[in-house]
Amino acid sequence: MMFFLEVTISGLMAGVMYSLVALGFVLIFKASGVFNFAQGVMALFAGLTLVGLMEKFGLPPWAGIMATIAVMILLAWLIEFLILRRLVNQEHIILFMATIGLAYVLEGLGDVMWGSDVKLLDIGLPQGAVDWLLDDYNLYVEKLEVAAAVTAVIMVIVLAIFFQKTRIGRALRAVADDHQAALSVGISLRTIWVIVWSVSGIVALVAGIMWGSKSGVQFSLSLIALKALPVLMLGGFTSIPGAIIGGLIIGMGEKWAEIYMGPIIGGAIENWFAYMLALVFLLFRPQGLFGEKIIERI
Amino acid sequence: MFYREAGQFKTTYKSDQALFPIAQDRYFVIGVVLFAFLVIPFFITDYWANALLLPFLIYALAAIGLNILTGYCGQLSLGTGGFLAVGAYASYKLMTSFPEMNLIVVFLLSGLITALVGIFFGVPSLRIKGFYLAVATLASQFFIVWLFNKVPWFFNYSATGQISVPPREIFGFLVTGPDASPAITYLFTLTLVSIFALLAKNMARGNVGRSWMAIRDMDIAAEIIGIRPLKTKLIAFAVSSFYIGIAGALLFAVWLGSAEPTEAFGIDQSFLILFMIIIGGLGSILGSFMGAAFMVLMPIFLKNFMVDGLGLQPAFSEHVQIMLMGVLIIFFLIVEPHGLARLWQIAKEKLRIWPFPY
Amino acid sequence: MSPEPVQTRIFEEEILSVSDVSLSFGGVKAIQNVSFDIKRGEIRAIIGPNGAGKTSMLNVINGFYHPQEGLIRFKGKARRRMRPSIAAAQGIARTFQNVALFKGMSTLDNIMTGRLPRLEKGIFGEIVNVFLQAAYLGPARRSELEQRKYVEEIIDFLEIQHIRRTPVGRLPYGLQKRVELGRALAMEPELLLLDEPMAGMNLEEKEDMSRFIIDVNDQYGTTIALIEHDISVVMDLSDRIIVLDYGRKIADGTPGEVQSNQAVMDAYLGVPHE
Ligand SMILES: Nc1ncnc2c1ncn2[C@@H]1O[C@H](COP(=O)(O)OP(=O)(O)O)[C@@H](O)[C@H]1O
Ligand SMILES: [Mg+2]
């Protein structure tokens, strides 16, 4: 029983990581309809930049984080200026391809600027097991993962407040429903895009920090982007709660499958299990858990 | 006025329905094909075959396959790498289990097997659409690669987990294995690719192609005018996978000679081929060739340029190369989102009215 | 407008009947207890203000919407739900309120798609067909040429020879509507449903379209159900008219009868409900 609990918790914690990437993705998809394949690479890029800045200039963590946020905002602006505004009325698949191109650019850029070896990211997040759980219940839970979960919760709350209470947030929601409506709020579409991409960049930075503190900043970081995709399918491309809950379900399901099913059918099934889970689920609910129901009209 | 269609009035629907109704197009294509069959084989070297021509032809075939599904039928797929793997492993199992089997039969069967797998993974497309479907196709990609890694039967229990092609002949010429001559491998591949490109063109311009495009352009309207979506999509999945399967078999057996699933058939392959059809032109057979040529040539140019031209470190230049590739892709999408095939068409239209632009 | 009202034509055989059909979307009652019939060979108009449920009615008839209640009887066969492709195969074709052409294809190819349901085969036949087409062999080539011939007749009939090769996305709206009619005609329908075929057209285009509708009805004997807002067009063209308002049928009869109906006048003059 203890073991089952441990598996479940570690699955949930891994799921939080997926959720963080999925979250940034949902923000962009909701506001601009762009399927941003580069979200995972953005996490890698943000992590690399943070490590690089801290190493090169000996910045303390908080200053490094501030500087990286500035870089991510600059990046969002560049993406809008160089790519999005030039592809504004193109088909979705073209924009999707452009984000794959962007993923290549960021991956190459990160490596060119900061080198390609695995970097340790230490901004002083707690390491090791949570003591009292280990002592009293013999349950092994990483402090870092708890921190990640707490951060994720805080971020969702902050985003919720941002969307509900601020003028920009309301404009963002309007633009998701109807591009014309956003204009009536008096904010240009371009500004809105820069803002969502910046917010997603910051979300990517958080994901990068969490993942990087756990296993170092390396290319595999961009692979968690691939794990975020089934999360999105499950949760619906446009739903923030979907991203969170989808992440938890995928993380948990994946761990259970790995532990209880893996040995039977040959291991390493985490590569595809999440996708199959999402696929089967989608067959019954094509719009995902929380996605808007697809109404076909003519 | 070298190039014109005015003046060539079609007197019958038959000639109007011909493959290349415009004479100049016809001559051009015939010229290229003759050159490819009768001239190149005399000059081909190992380097030209293995670095350029074989990958170009094989990727063009795979791109045609993906274009059928994505460009013509509108079903975005990221599972191409997996289907290439199915073709490759099918050919390997067939060649090693039935050493006497004719190579042509091996390749056709490999295509058919891949088509069946494609139909299986195509079924969800009835309910799942757009990007949801694209992500769903990743399930097949990862599952298939995993399967070929995990189940030793597929790689005949070889210790390395790799598959290596046995030497096989056709009409007394050695086509596979390290000793095959570049002219033969090239001609074999060229023949298959030319035939299948022609067949694809025929499908695309006939009823089958129209039903695909109808589903692509507006699936609800298509259904209301009586096109059955599931049937149409499954045919697209089957034909597309058939092409990709044969490309996978060629890629493994004729070009690389040995393969290992994660490297040769990973998701990067899926993206590479997707780029080919986008840069070449969605819904264009000619575009599939152009896109393949572009994506095969670009890395070679970039590498030569940076390592030999600028004297950069190979490792460093690899990163720059990835970056530049991304930049070029974005640049192309911005400049001509409809691909090289469209540029070519525009150029032809210019030529048609040249030198009198009115 | 085009030819003077035809003297009252008499039609005997019922081709379609709709009985007590109700359809709702969540809380929205799009159609409530509507019954009517369409006789073979007639031009039947459906009119009513926006949101009255006219388009939904066509969608019910061709199987795209499934009503919660009621029956549809087409050529004697009754059903409540069916797939649109089956309705198409049985001889129901239509055009759409918002043009629903295949944007990436030429006029010719769009109209050719209308021939597709005619060529339906079983699974095995389909597979053979794919191979034949790929090789462009015998039967495939012959059938392609036959269809082309049929479609060219439609193109001549609709006077759109000059845009045969143009991608429909580039055509002006009026021509797109015409191409859409062509696609429906290519299906050789027994019942043709036209959803606002003249919306957004100028007078000349409307006259052309009216002429086509009359000619189709005349030359091919096709039964037509027509949604149209331009009352004068409706009065000219149709044999009988159904009036819908808020999902209910409020009148049904010849143009003369409908014109003198008080409820209809109220609906059109916007007399507040209740
Ligand atoms: N697919 C649908 N989902 C929800 N509501 C619909 C749908 N189709 C039609 N409706 C509603 O049904 C009512 C009738 O619409 P419609 O048939 O289009 O009217 P008309 O064609 O007479 O203008 C409207 O209130 C419309 O909003
Ligand atoms: Mg309507």
Image: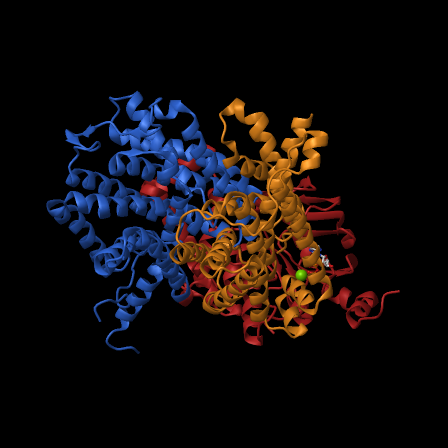
Locate residue C6 relative to residue B319 in the image: left or right: right
Chain B painted colour: blue
Q: Nearer the viewer, residue C255 or B84?
A: B84
Q: Quadrant of the N terminus of chain C?
A: bottom right
Q: Is residue C250 visible?
A: yes
Q: Is residue C18 above or below residue A57?
A: above
Q: Is residue B206 visible?
A: no
Locate residue A44 relative to residue A199 in the image: left or right: left
Q: Residue furthest left?
A: B42
Chain C painted colour: red
Colour-to-chain, orange: A
Percent coordinates x, y for residue C19 in the rendering: 75, 47
Residue A169, picture quadrant: bottom right
Q: Nearer the viewer, residue B186 or C71?
A: B186
Q: What colouring does the structure picture have?
A: by chain
Percent coordinates x, y for residue C171 in the rendering: 47, 68
Percent coordinates x, y for residue C64 in the rendering: 63, 48
Q: Is residue C156 above or below residue A19?
A: below
Q: Is residue C100 above or below residue B144?
A: below
